[in-house]
């Protein structure tokens, strides 16, 4: 009788799990910094907020998330300190505004493996100063990354 009671409690607990309103997307963690390739071609990620302003330097962001959706839609909203130059490799859905200082990129992640990643490379037309990247997933979850592109004052 005791086993039947415990088993019944277990089934009731499980049936209640389906009734909870979990968020469609939950951001677990995120970080950002500098992306470099070593001599062997391997990627090295270094967490940083201050990025040396040097043409060719790549800075990144990444997010770990949890979702039960088959495809994740997200917006990457990048705000520079001034007008920048924009080149895109893997999207044709974007809007440039604020005189060229802001871009919103719309993407879908069909692999939905729990990770999102983005990177930008400094070009000679990009301004030094503050950069803010806001990533909004499914209009529900948002993570903001802030950087400072710092020119060496030698």
Image: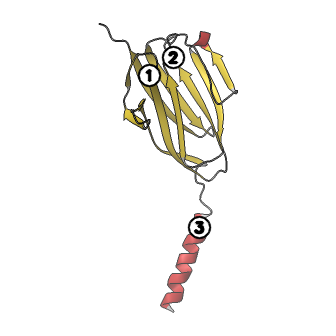
Residue carrying label 3: 16
Q: Position of residue 140 (x, y in %)?
A: 60, 40
Q: State which mark lies toward you, 1 or 2.
A: 1
Disc 2 target residue: 80
Furthest residue in direction top, as rendered: 154
Residue 84 versus residue 5 in the image, above or below: above
Sequence order check: which comes first, mark 1 or mark 2?
1
Q: Residue furthest left?
A: 154
Distance of mark 1 from mark 2, alpha carbons?
15 Å
When asked about the image quadrant of residue 12, the answer is bottom right
Residue at position x 48%, y 33% from top? 61
- Which one is earlier in the sequence, the residue at label 2 or at label 3? 3
The quarter of the rendered structure image containing the C terminus is top left
Instruction: Say few, some or many: other residues with alpha carbon within 10 Å of mark 2 (under 14 / 14 to 19 / 20 or more).
Output: many
Residue 149's x, y, as percent?
41, 17
Q: 50 left or right of 17? A: left
Task: Tell me whether the residue at label 2 lies in contact with that at label 3, contact meaning CB atoms closer than 8 angstroms.
Answer: no
Q: Secondary structure at mark 3?
A: helix
In the orientation shown, which residue stands out farthest toward the right? 92
- The residue to which callout 1 is attached is 57
Q: Nearer the viewer, residue 22 or 93?
A: 93
Badge 3, how many Cα within 10 Å: few under 14, some, many 20+?
A: few
Across and down, in percent, residue 95 comes to: 67, 21
Q: What is the C-alpha distance between the residues marked 1 and 3?
A: 50 Å
């Amino acid at each position: 009788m005791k086993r039947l009671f415990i088993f019944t409690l277990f089934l009731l607990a499980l049936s209640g799990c389906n009734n909870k309103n979990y968020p469609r997307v939950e951001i677990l963690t995120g970080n950002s910094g500098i992306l470099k390739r070593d001599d062997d071609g391997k990627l090295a990620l270094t967490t940083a907020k201050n990025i040396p302003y040097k043409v060719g330097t790549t800075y990144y962001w990444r997010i770990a998330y949890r979702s039960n959706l088959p495809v994740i839609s997200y917006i990457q909203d990048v705000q520079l300190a001034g007008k920048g130059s924009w080149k895109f490799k893997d999207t044709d859905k974007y809007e440039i505004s604020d005189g060229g200082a802001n871009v919103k990129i719309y993407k879908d992640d069909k692999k939905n493996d729990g990770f999102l990643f983005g990177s930008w490379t400094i070009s000679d037309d990009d301004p030094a100063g503050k950069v803010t990247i806001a990533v909004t997933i499914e209009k529900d979850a948002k993570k903001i990354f802030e950087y400072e592109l710092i020119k060496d004052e030698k």
